[in-house]
Image (spheres, grey):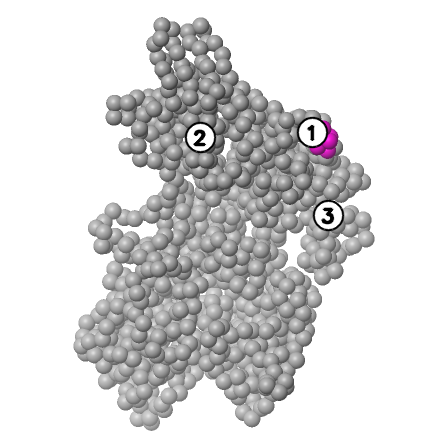
Amino acid sequence: MQVDRSGVLFSAGSTWLLLLFSTLSIRVTGVGGTHQSIPPSVVKLWASAFGGEMKSISAKYSGSQLLQKKYKEFERAVRVEEIDGLRLVKRLAENMEEMFHKKAQAMKRLVEAAEEAHLQHEEDPNLQYEYFNAVLINEVDEEGNSVELGGEFILQPNDHFNNLSVNLNLSVVQVPTNMYNKDSAIVNGVYWSEALNKVFVDNFERDPSLIWQYFGSAKGFFRQYPGIKWKPDEHGVIAFDCRNRKWYIQAATSPKDVVILVDVSGSMKGLRLTIARQTVSSILDTLGDDDFFNIIAYNEELHYVEPCLNGTLVQADVTNKDHFREHLDKLFAQGIGMLDIALTEAFNLLSDFNETGRGSECSQAIMLVTDGAVDTYDAIFAKYNWPERKVRIFPYLIGRESAFAENLKWMACANKGYFTQISTLADVQENVMEYLHVLSRPKVIDREHDTVWTEAYIDSTLEDGQGPVLMTTVAMPVFSTKNETRNRGILLGVVGTDVPVSELLKTIPKYKLGIHGYAFAITNNGYILTHPDLRPLYGDGKKRRKPNYSSVDLSEVEWEDKEDTLRNAMVNRKTGIFSMEVKKSVDKGKRVLILHNDYYYTDIKGTPFSLGVALSRGHGKFFFRGNVTVEEGLHDLEHPDVALADEWTYCNTDEHPEHRYLSQIEAIKLYLSGHEPHLYCDKELIQEVLFDAVVTAPLEAYWTSLVLNKSENSDKGVEIAYLGTRTGLSRINLFVVPDELTSKDFLTAEDREGVFNADHFPLWYKRAAEQVPGTFVYSLPFNTGSENKSVVLASTAIQLLDERKSPIAAAVGIQMKLEFFQKKFWTASRQCAALDGKCSISCDDEVSLFSPEDYTLTGNFFGEAEGAVMNKLLQMGSFKRVTLYDYQALCWVYSESSDSGRTLLDPYFAFFSAVKWILTELVMTGRTMQVPCDTEYPAFISERTIKENTGNIDCDGCVKSFVIQQIPSSNLFMVVVDNKCDCSMFEPITMDPIEIIIALTPTAHNESLKCERLKMQKDRRRPDTCHPFHPEENSMECGGAVNLTQSLVTTLLCLLVALFPR
């Protein structure tokens, strides 16, 4: 009888690849002509033959046995140490504290210089001063003359600033498009702040790792060093205003609880409601992660903009603010405005929420957005706010009418607030900013120069080859120190500097953390500052920012910690240890490693950050020290096949400009020469990398001999041999010329998961380390079989000692052509043998190898091609499914057309900023777009104790049989499947992610899920300082649109006197 069968090979490590899938024509004839199922003994023979052949080739060309022998020869000369995780994390925290302190000291020098310059400056309303405007520098008119505020400004490319053209001697001044760049207040501020240029330069000379330094003025201009030319967008607009940046707001004000009241009575229809929406949106822009808020619309009734948040406040993170913005478009105007009801609700809400202890417990404010008030509502203020006046009132009068301006200004002045009138959309941003100056008064009068650090954010001006750079900012406020203005509490602005997160990673010795270990840091709110699993960008090619990238919580990446034990301990600045089993996805979520991690954590003093270190148990908890002479180490380190990890810091070449052009190997040589005292290097790491260079040096000669003799053998499919060591040292040998490589990206910067990075070892190294010693891990990229241009990697780990707790010294491997690998497989599977005399196997000469349709399956997940077999294997226990979660995912959703009314109204902030956000933050195709979501997805791991198995599947009366056999010395299984039955009734098993939703009605589940998330508030730690009010502040500076009449002032004073106890 003739039976069609499929031969299948896939890996057993974490997830399996369908490497081969073809149709064999095999005759199996039993004794007496009876028919048998697939003989397991034959499959075992094939698997054994193939496994032996591949191990022989992999070991030969990788040199694994030679390298293992060399490390054994040094076994007596090395010292194995168990890593003290707690001691390690404390030392790392001290290193980071020192680095952060240097940045803060640079800002302190800027603050002192700015305050002294302002103190010596006399305001001159007629001052004329030509400064370097960031937009106008090097611009000329039609006659070739420099334009006003332009002039020649020398710019030169600088590699420290991503090769941007900058001026290291001068700063430039940027003024928002909606402001007049020769306004008297701006010109005076620019004039006295010129004194900062010397300090900018001095700071950079003291600390060459500094990048942008700047001064954001309360008047709106932005002084930036080094000087660089700014370019408007395609509409000729620069909407950047330093005063609505988080670093400015955090430095200028204290944390706050805010209730925003929005008038939606009938008189607010049309343009007024549009301006009101934009005003509320701009207020939200000024709120940060340490603030809490809610929005209530009112007419004759109260309408919480988010109904499920009735009676509470929520944290002002990006996700929550965006959620409320979506609801603003649903507001419509009708009825009569009952402000008394709204004010009463707002006061009660602030009071009740403050008693819960979950808010800021600092400043409190009510923002009133309305087109008028028929009364001053002094009875309500007397009941809820006087005499302490702990809640400030900030009325925003919408529209050009001024009939009710006096009432609204009275409310502001009586409650330590500020009144502004907003007539057009162009007025919104500037007027909203006024309240920040009021909230900064207590801090200014107290002369408290609090140092603040922001959460991580992306700077699009600098890139590291993988996209925009992740940053944090250190900032400090600048005050007027003139005695005559003390009680006015005048904030001059904020100074700041950016600190790339990569600077933090440079302080972390990756070699001390082991193969799977890593360091991470979080903010006082539990948001990630740095973590290897943080994915702030998405997309291929030019990457984009995710909308909520800056508020990813630690619990969203360390999701196995269901009780938030680790997160909460770190938020509360504790020092300690925590352990748990984790499922670490690798290879873009396609494979999973089951590890047991020990976490060590402590706080970074002087910052709002806490630091953690994760070490995996087993080999990850051990480190060894070798010892060789400097001479022999340098000799072997300089071999042409040696490279060091680009992102590891062996020597700090950024500290001094003269070192920036040195490679790490050149820097090590210079350091060891003893002739460069200003070059800081990691002495311990250098000693170990010299040791690894000596031990691995014999492989260069070994590989060279293979190249010379390669023409004499048939293994011409092997293209590359490679090795990596625990110190980031790698060696590469090509068996073919570079142009003939099947995959040219492997082991290059393009293959980020395949090389040593600042926060992880190569993927092939990590996978090899988790296999049984002496076995090879075979892998190839997923979904790469459409063309026969793929490769197979074979890697194995080199242990120092013959025990499980031995440190992994290195990993070696080869890259071979997929075609070569396939031929070896089919050669093994075509063997014929007699088995117990009961049957014979003859291999048909017409066997079809690797037909084009089969190639399309190469690299796919096995369950997609053979869902019925995969399902049976899961039932039999040969494999098990594990569920992984991704709380940083993006999902495609249907996008309804948005209201275009805003586009008719104002040039910059309503239209251009909205359009720009949509274009840059969302990927839109037709009527769909990607939005943040949570997903779960399966991964599959083998049961290692089950080496072989057989099974039968009933496919509508037709029985499909299969045999699975583990291939020795590998992570692979061979599967032989009887292909005569149609089992298409079994669904494929995929690894596709599924969005996590609550099982509610289709129309309600999304809103309910969002609501539950909004209500959920995790532990957070408040900033260390708070300045809600000061007894000396002048609360009569409360708005300039109208003047308080004498009668109103008298009435106000009488009321206050009556309310204060005698």
Quarter assignment of residue 282: bottom left
Alpha carbons under labels 2 and 1: distance apart: 31 Å
Q: Quadrant of the N terminus?
A: top left
Task: Please name which of the two marks, 1 or 3, marks the residue nearer to the observer.
Answer: 1
Q: Main secondary structure of the magenta part?
A: helix
Q: Position of residue 522 (x, y in %)?
A: 49, 53
Q: Position of residue 794 (x, y in %)?
A: 57, 32
Query: Which residue is identified by label 3?
Result: 665
Q: Is residue 705 magenta?
A: yes
Q: Looking at the image, which residue is at 48% across and 48% down?
A: 533
**Is 952 positioned to the left or the right of 724 in the image?**
left
Relative to 672, residue 721 above or below? above
Q: Position of residue 443 (x, y in %)?
A: 48, 73
Quarter assignment of residue 420: bottom left
Q: What numbered label is drawn on residue 21?
A: 2
Query: Which residue is identified by label 1?
Result: 711
Q: Quadrant of the C terminus?
A: bottom left
Q: Position of residue 775 (x, y in %)?
A: 56, 26
Amino acid type at circle 1 is: Ser
